[in-house]
């Protein structure tokens, strides 16, 4: 691994490892069983939490968990396991998955003697805090720790991504709802797997190329862009789609100085980077009910396209606004009805009242690059390219989509009716409903 990391560093890349939040494979850690949580029988294989994540563990599979209440276990985990990875090998970050797996069953034996009640939320918050502080200690030059979940205190240890969604338009809406709700709950930084983690259950109504492009555009104007999952990778799409992906990746990099500036504000104030319009215009009652637009920092209003459409309505609060791409000016408050949003373009507006010191120059640079991209594009998105994702056209991308959807359906059929009901509730409740109910969904 050290050789691989060195080779990646040599070409300017960073290396992030995958971690399952204290849920470990028992084999490699057999000599240290005293550092694991035990059940009432003394076994280190404990059943994972029920109902919280049945999509990943419908039958409560058993796993060993690191006992983070044991100082000896924490010292071993940090100074034996992770010191090798961070100091000796040079890993740059960690993606902490499965934060909702720790159970609260009676009889669990923790080193501290505390009850398991509340551990479902305490465990990931404590684990992420431990890893964040470890990075600060062993990597003074910086690193990245990001997680799938947490509890009270999770806002201190950025940042979070909002779990696994299907690559469907309705889940783009779920991603935005989760992000805004989490921001109102005090989580300053949240991102998502680019346009979804799992293939669509309904590929006919959710052309993967279109969903991917719209998800890419929304991710461009967020904390970060990252791809992960069992879906088509950005570089596996047709050239026309890859071309759009590259442009928005380029725009995201242009925005880095602005993201850093605004992230500093978030760290100092707690105001989320991706924020509900209400937080910028609390006196405008119209903003209270808008859940399909957001601010990125205090200078950019983003109106992502969350349906299969090429236009959408946009509300601009009081003040002077400019279209990011063409510089067209608007005086708010105003409603832009059926505002053009062709597939290659996401509606974004620059607020003249922004206090950003870097945004004006970045906007100029983005407009220059946008015009150059339009003139020099080697590929334009054609009907034929999009049809390659339609089942009735038999394209290779459509076949891949259908095969994935069938495999997903087969897994679901193997579950009992009761488990399937729980799974459907989980997809909506945890990734949308629970975050919203816990985080101030605003209504007029």
Image (spheres, rainbow, N blue to C red):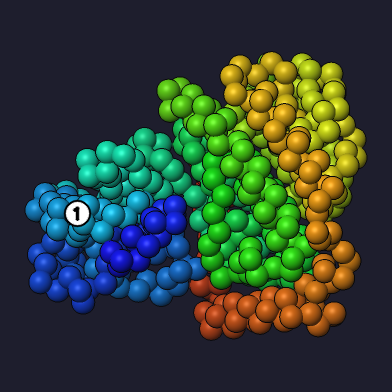
Helix, strand, or loop for circle 1? helix
In the rendered image of this protein, does residue 276 appear above or below residue 79? Answer: above
Image quadrant where one finds the C terminus: top right
Q: With 16 as the anchor, is 44 left or right in this view?
A: left
Instruction: Give coordinates of residue 128: x percent, y percent.
Output: 32, 47
Residue 226 visible in the shown view: yes
Residue 347 visible in the shown view: no
State which quadrant residue 412 falls in: bottom right
Q: With 249 as the anchor, is 383 left or right in this view?
A: right
Instruction: Give coordinates of residue 231: x percent, y percent.
Output: 61, 69
Image quadrant where one finds the N terminus: bottom left
Q: With 345 as the anchor, is 170 left or right in this view?
A: left
In the rendered image of this protein, does residue 136 appear above or below residue 352? Answer: below
- Residue at the (43%, 28%) spot, across then down: 267
Q: Which residue lies furthest to the front in this view?
A: 10
- Which residue is identified by label 1? 83
Q: With 251 as the anchor, is 44 left or right in this view?
A: left
- Residue at the (44%, 52%) spot, across then down: 12
Instruction: Give coordinates of residue 389: x percent, y percent.
Output: 77, 72
- Residue at the (63%, 63%) spot, across then down: 234
Q: In front: 316, or 101?
A: 316
State which quadrant residue 275 falls in: top right
Q: Residues within 10 Å of mark 1 (few under 14, many from 20)?
A: some
How many discs appear?
1
Instruction: Give coordinates of residue 164: x percent, y percent.
Output: 54, 60
């Amino acid at each position: 691994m050290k050789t691989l990391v060195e080779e990646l560093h040599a070409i300017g890349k960073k290396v992030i490892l995958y971690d399952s939040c204290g849920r470990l494979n028992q084999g490699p850690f057999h000599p240290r069983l005293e550092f694991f949580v035990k059940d009432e029988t003394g076994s280190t294989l404990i059943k994972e939490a029920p109902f919280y994540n049945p999509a990943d563990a419908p039958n409560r599979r058993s796993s060993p968990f690191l006992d983070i209440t044991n100082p000896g276990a924490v010292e071993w985990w940090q100074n034996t396991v992770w010191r090798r990875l961070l100091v000796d090998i040079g890993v740059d970050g960690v993606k902490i998955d499965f934060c909702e797996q720790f159970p609260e069953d009676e009889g669990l034996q923790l080193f501290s003697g505390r009850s398991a009640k509340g551990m479902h939320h305490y465990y990931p918050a404590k684990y992420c805090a431990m890893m964040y502080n470890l990075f600060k200690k062993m990597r003074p030059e910086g690193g990245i720790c990001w997680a799938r979940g947490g509890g009270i205190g999770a806002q201190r240890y950025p940042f979070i991504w909002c779990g696994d969604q299907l690559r469907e338009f309705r889940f783009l809406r779920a991603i935005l709802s989760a992000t805004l709700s989490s921001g109102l709950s005090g989580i300053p930084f949240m991102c998502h797997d680019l346009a979804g983690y799992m293939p669509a259950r309904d590929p006919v109504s959710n052309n993967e190329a279109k969903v991917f492009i719209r998800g890419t555009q929304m991710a461009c104007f967020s904390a970060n862009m990252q791809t992960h999952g069992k879906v088509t990778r950005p570089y596996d799409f047709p050239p026309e789609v890859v071309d759009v992906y590259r442009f928005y990746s380029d725009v995201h990099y242009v925005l880095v100085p602005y993201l850093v500036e605004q992230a500093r504000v978030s760290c100092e104030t707690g105001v989320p980077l991706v924020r509900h319009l209400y937080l910028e215009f609390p006196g405008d009652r119209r903003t209270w009910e808008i859940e399909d637009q957001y601010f990125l920092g205090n200078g950019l209003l983003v109106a992502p396209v969350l349906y299969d459409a090429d236009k959408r309505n946009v509300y601009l609060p009081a003040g002077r606004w400019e279209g990011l791409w063409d510089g067209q000016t608007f005086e708010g408050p105003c409603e832009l009805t059926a505002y053009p949003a062709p597939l290659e373009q996401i509606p974004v507006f620059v607020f003249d009242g922004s206090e950003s010191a870097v945004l004006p120059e970045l906007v100029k640079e983005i407009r220059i690059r946008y015009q150059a991209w339009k003139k020099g594009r080697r590929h334009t998105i054609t009907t034929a390219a999009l049809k390659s994702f339609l089942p009735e056209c038999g394209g290779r991308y459509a076949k891949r989509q259908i095969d994935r959807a069938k495999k997903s359906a087969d897994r679901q059929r193997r579950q009992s009716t009761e488990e399937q009901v729980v799974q459907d509730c989980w997809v909506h409740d945890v990734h949308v409903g629970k975050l919203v109910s816990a985080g101030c969904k605003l209504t007029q």
